[in-house]
Image (tube, rainbow, N blue to C red):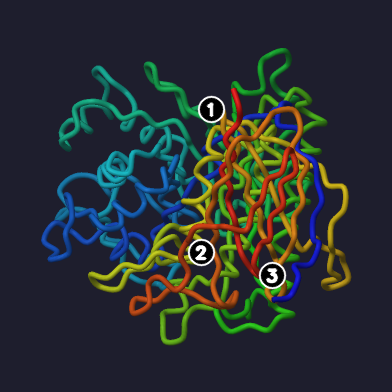
Amino acid sequence: MTEPTAALSAVIDLDVPGPTISRHLYGHFAEHLGRCIYGGFWVGEDSPIPNEGGIRADVVEALRALDIPNLRWPGGCFADEYHWSDGIGPRADRPRMINTHWGDVEENNHFGTHEFMALCELLGTEPYVSSNVGSGSVREASDWVEYLTRDGDSPMARLRRENGRDEPWKVRFWGVGNEPWGCGGNLRAEQFAPLARQYATYARNHGGNELYRIAAGASDDDYQWTATLMKEVTSRLGDRDPRDLFQAVSFHYYTFTGEWSDKGSATSFTRDEHWTAMSRALRVRQYIAGHAAVMDAYDPTKKIGLALDEWGTWWNVEPGTNPGFLYQQNAMRDALVAAVHFDAFHDHADRLRLANIAQTVNVLQAMVLTDEDRLVLTPTYHVFEMNRPHHDAQALAVRVRDRAEREVDGASIPTVSASASVKDGRVALSVTNLDPDASARVELDLRGRDVTAVSGRVLAGADVADHNTFDGPTTVAPRAFDGATLEGGRLVLDVPAGAFVVLDLALAG
């Protein structure tokens, strides 16, 4: 067997915990797009597929194992042509519409507010509702908040009761628009910023329900958009807390290897394309830091959060599928992309408060894929499941002393990514070997506290293009990891090629 390549040497001070890694960095996204809602989450009460009130039971069961903290809905681009009042009341009476963004197909509005809130209750997750700024109105958005969250006697509370829900729901996360620079209105930042202030003003806190308002932000590294939003918030409030308007601003970033019109294949790719995907995924670290630096100039005490509420891989659709449905396979390479994103999230937990992968079922970098009554878990699903110990843990800095790097598209990138956290006397350590062809040796000096036991799991395929299918659902699945040795405070891992490892370290005392 070939000796593993020395890829990372680092120090972790176990007694110096950092900021809390919000569980909401592991959020999800469900848009009315392709088969995410219809055929994914929703099959209808008359379906032969087991369901609870029309919500697909096997999907709920699979996702509950991820401890999903929040679910963003109804979009995405769809949010800015969605009128919530069309999705309430008897389903047979709900008006239909055309989903002009995604496939130009008819939307029957059978999955609306009540169905979404029921789904959140089944998943045990918090709703993240994206309001319509692009084609809606301030009153429409304000009424939706009232419908969802107001108790007592009011027009929208009465309407909710007429539709079968007596008690209001708890809704914390409230999106003010979506991609206003594109499908949400093709606006300039200077146009959107005052609109966002207006919409946020009328998104009221009713009773004990307090909204966490997230202003739709930039694409990729458009730091000027973030600066415009932050200036609009902080310059108009005087001595008032900037959180009186917004609690967060967002940005979106997707990973692909080609051009926008030809993004590359999910399962058939060269080694060069693999490394390009890794390089572009690692850019998220730079973009988070860039937006955070802009925010620091206006909000140095970090009162306002940053949200990456759309992220993930975006490949060409699977052959023979509707190009507007964005259905793609999900390989071990996608799992590596997810893993390096989470490492970046953990390292920026002081400013990054929420993130949502796109999307949960049957669309883009999905957790599960369905076909009629069949369901398969993707490699990305397993990364989310394996990384659960980081939820609400305190970040531990991985201080690099030496590391292997590779030149990719004119820049040097590390071949190994890692992050760590501590909670309840245990350390979670995630290590990702980006190299598809060579195992990696990782040497860590663990200082400050004694480690009494080490165990772990590894996720890997025979190749980074390996993926799970309905006929081969466990090609890529976690297994026990025996490649770690601990001597004193020195931890050595031999991580297989193209693999993701999560270790559990028990602390003394």
Residue 254 at least partly seen: yes
Relative to 247, is 100 above or below?
A: below
Read off the residue under disc 1. Answer: 424
Give the left or right position of residue 72, taking residue 256 as reference.
Answer: left
Read off the residue under disc 3. Answer: 277
Give the left or right position of residue 275, taking residue 212 as reference.
Answer: right
Q: What is the three-letter code of the residue carrying label 2?
A: Gln
Read off the residue under disc 2. Answer: 365
Picture coordinates of residue 426, whole percent (x, y): 57, 33
Q: Residue furthest top?
A: 239
Q: Which of pointers 1 and 2 indicates the residue nearer the eye? A: 1
Name the image quarter holding the C terminus.
top right
What is the quadrant of residue 156 in the picture?
Answer: top left
Picture coordinates of residue 440, whole percent (x, y): 73, 64
The residue at the point 38 percent across, 77 percent down is: 472
Disc with the residue nearer the chain's start (1 vs 2): 2
Q: Residues within 10 Å of mark 3 (few under 14, many from 20)?
A: many
Label 3 vs label 2: CA separation?
14 Å
What is the quadrant of residue 228 in the picture?
Answer: top right
Q: What is the three-letter code of the residue carrying label 3?
A: Ala
- Name the one closer to the observer, 121 or 485: 485
- Name the one closer to the observer, 343 or 324: 343
Label 1 vs label 3: CA separation?
35 Å
Q: Residues within 10 Å of mark 1 (few under 14, many from 20)?
A: few
Name the image quarter holding the N terminus.
bottom right
Q: What is the three-letter code of the residue carrying label 1?
A: Asp
Disc with the residue nearer the chain's start (1 vs 3): 3
Q: Which of pointers 1 and 3 indicates the residue nearer the eye? A: 1
